Image (cartoon, grey):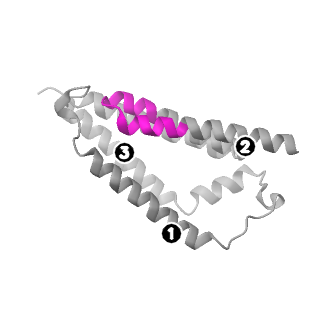
Amino acid sequence: MYAALVAQNVFFGIIAAVMIGGALRVVTTKNVVHAALWLVVVLAGAAGQFILLSAEFVATTQVLVYVGAIVVLFLFGTMLTRSRHGTDEDLTLRQWPLAAFVSILLLGIMAYVLIDAFSDDKLPDESALLVDNTAAISDAIFKPYLIPFWALSFVLLAALVGAIVLARRD
């Protein structure tokens, strides 16, 4: 059991490092298509973390919905619009020091709020965390949020149709 926990911690560290590197590349790359591909790395890493937590259903949902659908929608929107993308110097944002300061400030505020809110809580024991019923997991995720999930799918469909309309030639 102890060796399994050590291996799980090692894989967690590796996947987390890859996710952090991918997230940094998402926001620092100058090519929008490359940023979307680095986002695939980050979202696949999140699916890997779910697998480490023995939540295979959530990992599969992560891959299908986010990696499979959202990133494809981003790429369609990027490719179908006639906007310039690439490594043009006039497309780069020159306010990155302010963005970095705001990001660090938000990280500090979120860390303070989370530590203040959950500092006295204890983690449940392992037996309470094991859920083998996929139906129970899917009901817990999708049952209370079914209408917003459908609404989001219609918004994404409208965005894709809008991108196609913008991209077509008159």
Which mark is in front, 3 or 2? 2
- Residue 162 located within the stretch drawn in magenta: no
- Give the number of marks: 3
Instruction: Name the spot of residue 8 as percent of width and height, x first.
Output: 75, 41
Q: Is residue 170 above or below residue 155?
A: above
**Sequence-first tag of 1 and 2:** 2
Lateral position of residue 145 relative to residue 70, left or right: right
In the picture, the quarter occupied by the N terminus is top right
The front one of 51 and 154 is: 51
Counting from the top left corner in percent of width and height, residue 41 is at: 51, 33
Mark 3 neighbour class, 10 Å CA radius: few under 14, some 14 to 19, many 20 or more:
some
164 on left or right of 6:
left
User: Could you classify mark 2 by the number of other residues whose Cα lies within 10 Å: few (under 14), some (14-19), or many (20 or more)?
Assistant: few
Residue at image location 71% in from the left, 42% down from the top: 52
- Closer to viewer: mark 3 or mark 1: 1
Q: Label 1 vs label 2: CA separation?
A: 26 Å
Instruction: Inspect the image, locate mark 2, and give the three-letter code of the amino acid beneath it.
Output: Asn
Residue 64 seen in the current view: no
**Residue at position x 71%, y 38% from top?**
10
- Give yes or no for residue 33 being in the magenta stretch: yes
Q: Secondary structure at mark 3?
A: helix
Mark 1 belongs to which amino acid?
Val
User: Which secondary structure class fits the magenta region best?
Assistant: helix
Seen in the picture, residue 48 relative to 155 is either above or below; the reply is above
Which residue is tagged 3? 156
Q: Residue 163: x and y, percent?
A: 26, 36
What are the residue bounds of the magenta stretch? 19-39
Numbered badge on residue 113: 1
Q: Sequence-wise, which precedes: disc 3 or disc 1?
A: 1
Residue 74: which disc? Answer: none
The amino acid marked with disc number 3 is Leu
Numbered badge on residue 9 = 2
